[in-house]
Image: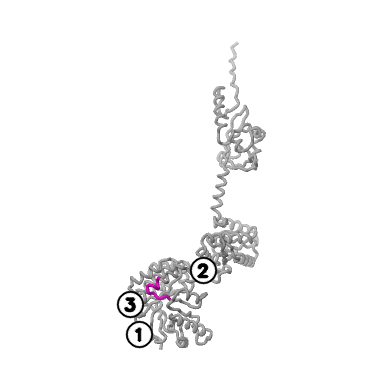
Amino acid sequence: MPKKPRKTRKPKQTAIVRFLGRPAKPAAKLKQREASFRLLFDSNPIPMIVCALRDERILAVNDAAIQHYGYSRSEFEKLTIRSLQAFDPELPWADSHSGDERAARTWKHVRADGALIDLAIYSRQLVYGDQPAVLLALMDITERKRAEAQMTFMAQHDGLTGLPNRNLLRQKMDDILLRTRRSAEQVAVLVLGLDHFKAVNDTLGHGIGDALLRGVAKRLRSILREGDALARLNSDEFVIVQSRVTRPEDAAFLARRLLDVIADPYLLDGHSVVIGASIGIAMSPGDGDESEKLLKNADLALSRAKNDSRGTFSFFEAGMDARAQARRKIETELREAVQSDVLRPYYQPLVDLSSGRITGFEALVRWPHPERGMISPAEFIPVAEETGLINAVGGLMLRRACMDAVQWPDDIRVAVNLSPLQFRVGNLLSLVMDALNQSGLSAKRLELEITETLLLEKSSEVLATLHALRALGVRISMDDFGTGYSSLSYLRSFPFDKIKIDQSFVRDLAANPDAQAIVRSIISLGKGLGVTITAEGVETEAEVNCLRDEGCQEGQGFLFSRARPNAEIVSLLKAQRGYGAALVA
């Protein structure tokens, strides 16, 4: 009989490590591999656990796992991997997900002290002690997740107040609007703007301003319901999204509460700060059913509230959008007109009431539009003020007025209006000096008109600029006297050369005893201070006679002349000088 082939004995599998899919190794190599595994496993700084595939028991842990989880080795050996998992019933090596999905997944484990940690788990199957097992490498990403959450929060929230920013607000609004479309309820969007917030920053500093904004945010939160949304749009504007609204009165009621809670004084670093607010309201679905449209319409309503009467609220109306588009068109075309040097000064005479002769002219800006004809200053000057274009417009008028006036007789002055914004730029003194130097006009023939609003800020820089201008020889006039807050106190702060009586006191002067008493007082005050008094808006002979009887020196108005281009002014002055003519007898 042929000899049976001799059976070769398989080497006994040692304690650790025959990775699945690999052929068995000789005993010496297995021992060497086991030693390498032990060295890699035990001394690895990453927590590592070996689990049985059959019953999920923890078979081995390295020192890093003991230190990280807080369990002893013996305590670990009494646990299964599910004992460490906080919420998820799945196993880290479950085959229901692809390898990429498992690698991207975050697991939550519970440490011995009960703390939750976030982990990225990497697994590899092996044979451990003759039984199928899995090796888990556990990368703690708790800090990384916390940092990611912080970055996400910062990307969606205002850093100063902690309120949602515009991006998160849109998401919240979209969710609220989606829910509302399924019901008969409405959504009110309220854009709240703080009144004169810049004045707080300028006078008390940005630290107080920041504290005020945090205080406002806290008060707004305190009166909103659960389900309403609150966000900060920009430096001094907040948005409130009011859900479960059944009628506009609900939004009006909330707006009044918001205005009341904002108005109470704030005690900030020893300062008692009072701030007001204005609110614009848009209602969904009538004013729009998308977040951006509602925000835009509420902002238009806010502009209306601020322009009409600060400290109140206004609902959006359909015509507001058309007016806003018209305003944007005016702004665009005004920029082009400034760049193209289209604006022109027209001049209205200032007349000596005793002699009837012209003493000077006030330069008034005019805009000849190629399609719309002459555009009223009442239409474009407010836009220039709001956009800052008034600086360019004012500078252009000053230079042109000086160039025109230098061609007039030496005893004729020119008056130019200044906006408060021109003082804030900081270059007004140099602008005036350049205009005088380039034109050759004597400083004593230039008169600059300011309004009381400029002195409301009580700025030392403003007063210093006025004194410097007067030191050049330029005359300073207070326009619209009597219409501001405390005209007499401003006469103490700066020695004006002229006071102009506002036209509201001159209109129908002869038939209005109250207006006569006011005008008489202003003229008497001017005489006592040694300043010239000019009456604006003179339109009738009766008004002239009354002003002359009271001792008013100058008049200006349609009775004498409308504002005229420089070519007509030159002719008018030639006629006065050549024939001794006067505008009023």
Q: Amino acid at mark 3?
A: Gln
Q: Which mark is residue 407?
A: 3
3D distance between C-alphas at marks 1 and 3: 15 Å
Please report contact status of discs 2 and 3: CB closer than 8 Å, yes or no: no
Task: Please tell me whether residue 294 is drawn above or below residue 128 in the rendered image.
Answer: below
Q: CA distance from mark 2 to mark 1?
A: 48 Å
Query: Where is mark 2, residue-wise?
Result: 322
Which kind of residue does numbered mark 1 sit on?
Gln
Mark 1 packing: few (<14 Cα in 10 Å), some, or many (20+)? some
Residue 358 image offset from top left, x and y in percent: 38, 83
Per the rendered image, the range of residues in magenta is 468-476
Q: Which secondary structure, mark 3?
A: loop
Q: Residue 427's quadrant in the figure?
A: bottom left
Q: Are marks 2 and 1 in contact (CB under 8 Å)?
A: no
Q: In which image quadrant can residue 281 be found? A: bottom right
Which secondary structure, mark 1? helix
The image shows residue 546 at horizontal and vertical percentages of 47, 87
Apparent side of residue 111 relative to residue 550 in the rendered image (left or right): right
- Of the residues tagged 2 and 1, which is closer to the observer? 1
Please say if 321 is above or below 82: below
Of callouts 2 and 1, which one flags the residue occurring earlier in the amino acid sequence? 2
